[in-house]
Amino acid sequence: MLDKTQIDFFNRNGFIRIPGVLDKEKAEEFRKDSLSLFQKEAQLQDSDKLRANMFARHHEMRWLLTDPCINSLVKDLLGQEFTYIEREASVGLNWYTSWHRDTEGPELGGEAWAWKPNLKLVQLMWYLQTECPEYGGGLEVIPGSHLRRDWKKTDYEGSQVVRGFRRRALHWIRNKTDMTEPIQGLPYVIPNDPGDLIVFNMRILHKATFPTICKESEVPKEREKILVSYVAAPKNEDCINYKNYLAKCSNKVYDETPQSNTKAEAVVS
């Protein structure tokens, strides 16, 4: 269960890291299962770096929907009953992204709800390797940007050299000063170990942490980046709006697997 300090941190900064949700053994099994998906034949929307729609296609991942500890944490953050948007679930292998918001699509599509007050669509992120300055493998965010539409991703973009220098400088400062509280508006690399859960508001500006001593394709096998992500939404207008947007994008009625939806909702209601 999360306390008021943690929930206030999440609401203020737009993200939270919850360490040690999975023990070492479970985290290792999780990483192994996630990697094994890339040995299977690719399906629609899959690539050599992505396995899409993971809950419908890979039943070995469905425990994430019904785990009582995870569901309790998400309910604490959202402050109400919620559901998972099962189609918005994927596993990434060496998948690196630049600065963006996960609500950019709806915003560019003219969806006014994307910037409504108190929007609480969230991403659950499992980075199944330790984040480090040398090999990256984690997440960098702009704290507070989920509340600031005027903060643009172009304000934070830069060359790989600049990004690498900034990473190392911030890492050095954090170690020397015990700087654990993020500063609003300044890039913040979230510490991460396998088994930690990171949850963020989908409006927050964020990007992958890149390796600084080699190319992404040269990261050692044992440090390969594995990311499992999926979306949760309150059972309210936010969820309806997001599902309608997804349906519009796919040109078909949005539906979840009835059986799986029933199981998930039985736990989180």
Image: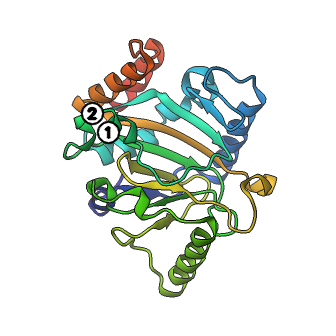
At mark 2, the secondary structure is loop
In the rendered image, the residue lying farthest to the left is 117
Find residue 48 and report its horizontal and vertical position in percent. Answer: 72, 35
Amino acid on which the number 1 mark rests in the picture: Glu
Q: Nearer the viewer, residue 157 or 124?
A: 157
Amino acid type for the residue under numbered disc 2: Glu
Q: Residues within 10 Å of mark 1 (few under 14, many from 20)?
A: some
Residue 102 place in picture, x, y as percent: 42, 43
What residue sits right under mark 1 in the picture? 107
Q: Check the image and report above or below for 70 versus 137.
A: above
Where does residue 113 sit, x and y in percent of width and height? 23, 36
Mark 1–mark 2 Cα distance, whole angstroms, equals 5 Å
Contact between marks 1 and 2 (CB within 8 A): the answer is yes
Identify which residue is drawn at 57% across, 68% down. Answer: 163
Residue at (69% x, 63% y) in the render: 135
Relative depth, front residue between 104 and 53? 104
Q: Is residue 255 left or right of residue 56?
A: left
Residue 35 on image: x %, y %: 72, 39
**Residue located 64% across and 61% down the image:** 136
Which coloring applies here?
Answer: rainbow
Q: Classify 10 Å Cα crowding around label 2: few (below 14), some (14-19), many (20 and above).
A: some
Identify the residue at image location x=39%, y=25%.
246
Q: Secondary structure at mark 1?
A: helix
180 relative to 4, above or below: below
Q: What residue is pinned by disc 2? A: 111
Reply above or below: 188 against 88.
Answer: below
